Image (cartoon, coloured by chain):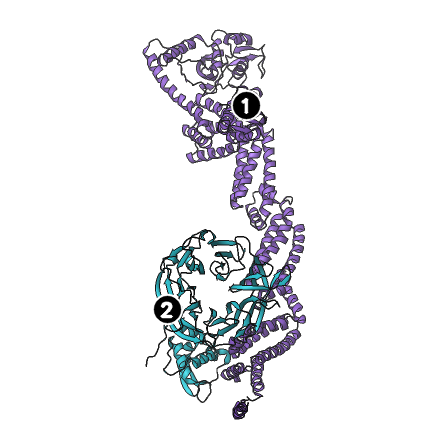
Chain colours: A cyan, B purple
């Protein structure tokens, strides 16, 4: 079909392709617009071609991607300019999809190791929904985009950061301790500009109060954070992401401690909010699931009754695996445990995969951290991350399927999963690793 | 310090900042601004998309995103102001068309502008939380066109005017309307709702309030409903054609409220055409329409139901208490059945077999059937009539149908035990006189009664059938034995042996039978007792019949079919031609009431008067004299002289039956009380009453006062005792 044929001149190089191929780029892309009938396509009469003032080398690769769905990067071509070109044509999503597959713990490659400027003491690492991440260091938060380029660091007036989270690739929320002058608390920042967007206030009885925000979670609309006020206004606050206004504040009650929670997680399938009070911020471990609409407790687990036994197991971290209806926990000996989310008053089924190891008091030890993706559970131990694949209905039947370890870096202090990537933060040096599953169609040149 | 100075000195030339052309941003923006102008002026064919895209890209890349964005806002606003002026200037009917044309043009321009600014949308807008270009264009259109003071009201007025004109029968440009409402929806549901839908609903509300007011004054109910239905369909169609589909529920609600809901009472109660007259005249279509329209209103069906119930109860009450109707029980029951059929048909055809209406119908029937204390008797009489003669030549299915209908009426009865009493009597008569048409039909009804009320209810009725059968066998045996003995020219005797208790026998029946008969009876008695020892036989002379051969003057021979009593009387005339009442009474010893009746039928019925009475009159008095009517003649050889039996019970008989029923209820109530107390041990008065009522209501509605009496009687007999502390509590004594 001659009518389907399109002649392009990109930076002086002649390309012939079809409208169908260009339409693969999607209506929201520049390449689709260029052939849109609105722009009564008047090709240069002499050459009968459309001119695009870009580098033809990259266009070759991108056109090939549109034609075949595969990304073939020739040797010597840098990735960054390729992404820039893709962004120009509006097909960056195509490139990303071709480059990186959905996260699969058993097929992970370490694609980058990023060293920061500080020396250790990274508090937390959090993944952004688009594959970027941020690292909290004392009173600083370093933000990296999906290309692992560092953005303007967010400095927080020397208040220590308790928790960080992404609302969108461009917005992070930071939780800090309170300070007397009204600073501290919780605020959202624009990562592009490094500027503050909203300062989230806690209002008790019509009066805005100082508070310490410990842990946070978010869904598409709201931000949730555990808060401690000066005058025992403990509980979980809810804010609107767009306006930054407080929606509700759920005060804690007896048998339902909330304000001290150091881990929160939003469960999108069931619309539940997991709130966990863990050692050392509280003596006993309380894990609660709150209904986001009624704000009532729908499920809880605590170890109050279990304390004082000989082989005391203290829960150090927890993560809910919604797909398996299981809350996973890990104790100070790196033992994994599983609690059924479907019924209340369940005991923990501990897996004795790890034996309590001898802990040398001398060196600072990193306790195990948990993260999950679908029915895969990630658990860090010393300098490795272990991957467990569980059948859909029972995480405790899981089998360890992979171990991720790099020679450098040392003990792991935090891990995070998001944007189809696994981020691993090391304790001793300021370095974090980025793991991802290669795309199904990426062709890596070996020559 | 020195070193630093040195360094500074060295480095300085390199620190020179590469300045971009200071007018770069201005120039680039100018190109883009011109392009936007050209696009709005439909002059885009000369533009190069690639060049414009690249320029916008460069502006964003060089951090002029803000300038680009605000420039776009300004330029677009400027154009929209211009468009607003053009639209405002449009005359009359062209206004909407102009708006539609401009809207389509704007959409196209917006699309192109968005194409150019795609890169800005992806990066700058995203990063700085701005409104994307397309949405921005819609918002500006909303603020500068649709909601500009001069256009907003005019647009609304024009739209509402068009709708109004269509409602009053004019043809309007629906396509244009559709485009405009679609535009409003695209600008956001709140725009559609605030700027159009709400006023539209208000206008509809006003319109229909007025119209329904006029309509209700000039139309009758069916007419009104037809128009209401039409209006409703019109509105639904309107939504489908040119409004947002979400408006359908809202506008129909308005019509429902104004046209039906607010006029509901007036409509159903409309004289000569409302619900009642529709029911009376079986207007299935109108009723169906009313049902489907009223169903839309929450209280609609309830209103209909209440009125129907009231009407049913009132007509039913009139029917069952009308003294005229009470004269003929068969007609009475037939009327009830017809009434039931009528409403069943209405509910089925017009009310979608609505359960609630069926319930209302049933409760109404239950209410008024029990208003007449004689209903059980009449229903039994109706069955009697049907089973005697009414079912001749009727197919089996039709029989079942009639019986099913009767059972339905039976279900409404509260005093089922009264029905049973009468039914037993009537059945006895049918069986003994051999008048029942179909054994199958009889048995079928008993099965129905059994399924309805249980085994106990019909055990005696079934016993009656068994008696009939054994009697036939006994007679065969008796005839066989007596056939052997010689010299048997006397009368033939047929005996039916009835079990006491199963049959409604009267103990007081007596009479002096003629000696010939007596001899036969004794013979049978001997035969029977020889086979069944230990039994006692009494003769129920009041229930028997006899066939007599009589010879009148001129040798006229006739066979007379008479009752046992009549036989006894006629036998007397074998000896004498003339007898006084007193003589007859003395000779036969028949109870006065029965005697009078028998004589009446022998002497006073025209064409069947085998006796003559002096003086001639209808009624029998004690001084009358009876003479053998020699001149009797009849076309038929066989003459049936039926006793003048009141089909209905006479007043004293009624009283008697009533009393019997009450008497029978006593042990049933007591049994129920004892059953309940045995399981509960301790119960207060009110609870006993309600439990007893619950247990017995399948048979009859026990009167609380009667229950109380029974309880007291049980206390006397030491089945129960009152609690010593709380006198309202009863205790069961085992």
Figure quadrant of residue B165: bottom right
Measured as percent of width and height from the top left, residue A392 is found at: 38, 59
Above-or-below relation of B96 to B693: below
Measured as percent of width and height from the top left, residue B516 is found at: 42, 9
Give the SS element for disc 2: strand
Give the SS element for disc 1: strand
Where's the N terminus of chain A, which quadrant?
bottom left
> Closer to the observer: label 2 or label 1?
2
Asked whether residue B677 appears in the rendered view, the answer is: yes
Where's the C terminus of chain A, which quadrant?
bottom left
Measured as percent of width and height from the top left, residue A243 is found at: 59, 67
Q: Which chain carries label 2?
A: A
Residue with the mark numbered 1: B721
Above-or-below relation of B208 to B666: below
User: In the image shown, does B612 or A149 lie closer to the viewer?
Assistant: A149
- Badge 1, how many Cα within 10 Å: few under 14, some, many 20+? some
User: In the image shown, does A379 or B519 lie closer to the viewer?
Assistant: A379
User: In the image shown, does B349 or B103 lie closer to the viewer?
Assistant: B103
Measured as percent of width and height from the top left, residue B44 is found at: 54, 82
- The residue depicted at 59 percent of the width and 71 percent of the height is B139
Residue with the mark numbered 2: A404
User: In the image shown, does B324 or A408 lie closer to the viewer?
Assistant: A408
Q: Are labels 2 and 1 on one chain?
A: no
Q: Which chain carries label 1?
A: B
Q: Which residue lies furthest to the front in this view?
A: A362
Asked whether residue B436 appears in the rendered view, the answer is: no
- Badge 2, how many Cα within 10 Å: few under 14, some, many 20+? some
Figure quadrant of residue B312: top right
């Amino acid at each position: 079909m001659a009518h389907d044929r399109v002649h392009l001149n990109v930076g002086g190089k002649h390309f012939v392709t079809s409208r169908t191929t260009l339409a693969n780029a999607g209506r929201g892309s520049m390449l689709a617009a260029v052939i849109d009938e609105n722009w009564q396509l008047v090709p240069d009469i002499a050459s009968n071609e459309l001119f695009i003032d870009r580098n033809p080398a990259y266009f070759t690769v991108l056109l090939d991607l549109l034609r075949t769905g595969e990304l073939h990067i020739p040797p010597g071509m840098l990735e960054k300019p390729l992404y820039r070109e893709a962004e120009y044509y509006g097909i960056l999503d195509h490139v990303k999809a071709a480059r990186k597959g959905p996260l699969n713990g058993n097929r992970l490659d370490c694609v980058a190791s990023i060293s920061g400027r500080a020396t250790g003491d990274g508090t937390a690492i959090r993944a952004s929904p688009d594959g970027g991440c941020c690292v909290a260091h004392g009173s600083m938060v370093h933000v990296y985009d999906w290309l692992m380029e560092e953005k303007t660091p967010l400095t927080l007036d020397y208040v220590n950061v308790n928790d960080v989270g992404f609302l969108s690739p461009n917005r992070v929320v930071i939780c800090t301790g309170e300070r007397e002058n009204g600073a501290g608390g919780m605020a959202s920042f624009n990562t592009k500009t490094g500027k503050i967007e909203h300062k989230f206030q806690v209002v008790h009885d019509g009066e805005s109060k100082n508070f310490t925000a410990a842990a946070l979670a978010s869904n598409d609309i709201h931000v949730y954070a555990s808060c401690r006020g000066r005058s025992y206004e403990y509980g979980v606050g809810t804010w609107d992401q767009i306006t930054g206004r407080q929606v509700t504040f759920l005060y804690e009650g007896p048998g339902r401690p909330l304000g001290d929670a150091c881990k929160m997680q939003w469960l999108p399938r069931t619309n539940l909010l997991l709130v966990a009070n863990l050692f050392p911020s509280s003596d006993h471990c309380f894990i609660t699931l709150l209904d986001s609409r009624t704000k009532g407790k729908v499920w809880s687990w605590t170890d109050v009754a279990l304390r004082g036994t000989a082989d005391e197991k203290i829960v150090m971290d927890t993560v809910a695996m919604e797909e398996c209806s299981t809350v996973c926990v890990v104790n100070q000996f790196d033992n994994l445990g599983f609690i059924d989310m479907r019924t209340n008053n369940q005991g923990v089924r501990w897996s004795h995969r790890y034996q309590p190891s001898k802990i040398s008091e001398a060196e600072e030890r990193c306790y195990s951290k948990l993260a999950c993706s679908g029915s895969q559970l990630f658990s860090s131990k010393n300098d490795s991350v272990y991957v467990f694949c569980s059948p859909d209905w029972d995480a405790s039947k899981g089998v360890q399927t992979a171990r991720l370890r790099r020679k450098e870096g040392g003990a792991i202090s935090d891990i995070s999963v998001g944007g189809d990537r696994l981020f691993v933060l090391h304790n001793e040096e300021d370095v974090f690793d980025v793991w991802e599953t290669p795309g199904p169609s990426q062709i890596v040149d070996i020559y | 310090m020195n070193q630093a100075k040195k360094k500074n000195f060295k480095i300085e030339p390199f620190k020179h900042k590469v300045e971009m052309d200071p007018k770069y941003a201005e120039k680039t923006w100018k190109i883009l601004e011109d392009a936007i102008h050209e696009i709005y002026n439909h002059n885009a064919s000369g533009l190069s998309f690639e060049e414009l895209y690249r320029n916008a890209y460069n502006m964003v890349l060089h951090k002029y995103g803000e300038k680009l964005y605000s420039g776009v806002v300004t330029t677009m606003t400027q154009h929209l102001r211009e468009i607003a002026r053009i639209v405002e200037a449009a005359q009359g009917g062209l206004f909407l068309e102009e708006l539609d044309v401009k809207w389509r043009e704007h959409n196209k321009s917006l699309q192109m502008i968005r194409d150019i600014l795609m890169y800005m949308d992806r990066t700058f807008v995203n990063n700085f939380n701005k409104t994307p270009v397309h949405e921005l264009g819609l918002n500006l259109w909303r603020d500068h066109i649709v909601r500009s003071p001069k256009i907003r009201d005019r647009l609304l007025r024009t739209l509402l005017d068009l709708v109004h004109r269509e409602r009053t029968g004019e043809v309007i440009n629906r396509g244009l309307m559709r485009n405009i409402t679609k535009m409003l929806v695209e600008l956001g549901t709140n725009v559609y709702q605030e700027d159009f839908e709400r006023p539209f609903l208000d206008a509809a509300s006003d319109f229909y309030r007025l119209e329904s007011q006029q309509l209700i004054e000039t139309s009758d109910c069916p007419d009104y409903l037809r128009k209401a239905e039409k209006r409703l369909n019109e509105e639904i169609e309107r939504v489908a054609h040119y409004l947002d589909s979400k408006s359908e529920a809202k506008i129909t609600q308005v019509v429902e409220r104004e046209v039906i809901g607010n006029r509901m009472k007036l409509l159903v109660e409309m004289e000569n055409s409302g619900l009642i007259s529709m029911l009376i005249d079986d207007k299935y279509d109108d009723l169906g329409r009313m049902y489907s329209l009223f169903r839309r209103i929450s209280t609609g069906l309830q209103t209909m139901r209440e009125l129907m119930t009231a009407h049913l109860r009132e007509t039913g009450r009139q029917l069952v208490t009308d003294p005229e109707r009470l004269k003929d029980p068969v007609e009475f029951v037939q009327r009830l059945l017809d009434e039931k059929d009528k409403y069943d048909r209405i509910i089925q055809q017009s009310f979608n077999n609505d359960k609630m209406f069926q319930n209302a119908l049933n409760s109404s029937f239950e209410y008024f059937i029990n208003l007449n204390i004689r209903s059980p008797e009449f229903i039994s009489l109706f069955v009697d009539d049907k089973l005697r003669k009414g079912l001749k030549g009727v197919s089996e299915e039709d029989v079942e149908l009639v019986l099913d209908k009767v059972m339905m009426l039976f279900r409404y009865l509260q005093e089922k035990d009264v029905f049973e009493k009468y039914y037993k009597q009537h059945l006895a008569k049918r069986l003994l006189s051999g008048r029942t048409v179909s054994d199958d039909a009889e048995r079928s009804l008993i099965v129905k009664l059994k399924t309805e009320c249980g085994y106990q209810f019909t055990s005696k009725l079934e016993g009656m059938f068994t008696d009939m059968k054994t009697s036939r066998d006994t007679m065969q045996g008796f005839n066989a034995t007596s056939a052997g003995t010689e010299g048997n020219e006397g009368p033939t005797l047929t005996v039916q042996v009835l079990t006491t208790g199963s049959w409604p026998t009267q103990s007081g029946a007596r009479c002096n039978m003629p000696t010939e008969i007596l001899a036969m009876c004794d013979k049978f008695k001997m035969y029977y007792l020889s086979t069944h020892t230990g039994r006692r036989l009494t003769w129920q002379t009041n229930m028997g019949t006899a066939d007599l051969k009589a010879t009148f003057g001129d040798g006229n021979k006739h066979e007379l079919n008479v009752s046992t009593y009549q036989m006894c009387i006629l036998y007397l005339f074998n000896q004498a031609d003339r007898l006084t009442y007193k003589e007859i009474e003395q000779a036969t010893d028949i109870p006065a009431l029965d005697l009078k009746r028998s004589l009446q039928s022998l002497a006073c019925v025209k064409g069947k008067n085998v006796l003559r009475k002096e003086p001639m009159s209808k009624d029998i008095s004690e001084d009358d004299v009876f003479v053998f009517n020699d001149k009797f003649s009849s076309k038929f050889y066989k003459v049936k002289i039926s006793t003048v039996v009141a089909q209905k019970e006479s007043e004293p008989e009624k009283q008697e039956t009533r009393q019997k029923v009450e008497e029978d209820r006593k042990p049933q109530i007591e049994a129920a009380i004892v059953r309940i107390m045995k399981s509960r041990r301790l119960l207060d008065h009110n609870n006993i009453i309600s439990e007893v009522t619950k247990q017995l209501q399948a048979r009859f509605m026990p009167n609380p006062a009667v229950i109380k009496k029974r309880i007291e009687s049980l206390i006397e007999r030491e089945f129960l005792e009152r609690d010593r502390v709380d006198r309202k509590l009863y205790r069961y004594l085992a």
